[in-house]
Image (tube, rainbow, N blue to C red):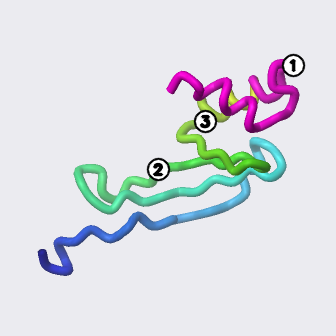
Amino acid sequence: MSEQQRSSSPRAVYNRPASEIGPGWTIVGIERDGGAAKGHVDEYWYSPISKKEFRSMKEVQRFLSVLESSRANGDEEAAYSMIFASV
């Protein structure tokens, strides 16, 4: 396989605070490096304490809802496991 045929690893296009969600949250944009969607930028959000990764704003909102509930009581690990335990 030639150098041009090898796909390089995805690259972060941006990495910035996601202050619109809350303090400590970050958002990273990763550019796809191959296939039909080459050049598309996927966004990933990371929680402030445990740095859990979320693939959509819908996942973030669900996480925040559980995190703020009495079930998780502000514990990121507990909230995350409640949401993704069945995945």
Q: Which residue is mark 2?
A: 42
Q: Which amino acid lies under the numbered mark 1 shown in the image of this protein?
A: Ser
- Choose between 73 and 16: the one closer to the eye: 73
Tell me which numbered mark, 2 or 3, is placed earlier along the sequence. 2
- Choose between 16 and 67: the one closer to the eye: 67
Tell me whether the residue at label 2 lies in contact with that at label 3, contact meaning CB atoms closer than 8 angstroms: no
Relative image position of residue 86 (x, y in whole percent): 54, 22
Q: Which amino acid lies under the numbered mark 3 shown in the image of this protein?
A: Met
Task: Kindly report the distance in space between the C-alpha atoms of the residues bearing marks 1 and 3.
Answer: 22 Å
- Relative to residue 52, is residue 11 drawn left or right? left
Task: Kindly report the distance in space between the C-alpha atoms of the residues bearing marks 2 and 1.
Answer: 32 Å
Task: Kindly report the distance in space between the C-alpha atoms of the residues bearing marks 2 and 3.
Answer: 12 Å
Image quarter (top left, top right, bottom left or bottom right) of the N terminus: bottom left
Q: Residue furthest bottom?
A: 3
Q: Which residue is mark 3?
A: 57
Residue drawn at (86%, 33%) of the image: 74
Mark 1, other Cα within 10 Å: few <14 / some 14–19 / many ≥20? few
**Residue 86's mark?**
none
Relative image position of residue 44 (x, y in whole percent): 56, 48
Q: Is residue 71 above or below residue 81?
A: above
Relative image position of residue 39 (x, y in whole percent): 35, 59
Mark 1 or 3: in front is 1
Residue drawn at (37%, 57%) of the image: 32
Q: Which residues are magenta?
A: 66-87
Residue drawn at (32%, 71%) of the image: 8
- Relative to residue 43, is residue 62 drawn left or right? right
Label 1: which secondary element: loop
Q: Which residue is mark 1?
A: 70
Q: Is residue 80 above or below residue 53?
A: above
Q: Is residue 24 magenta?
A: no
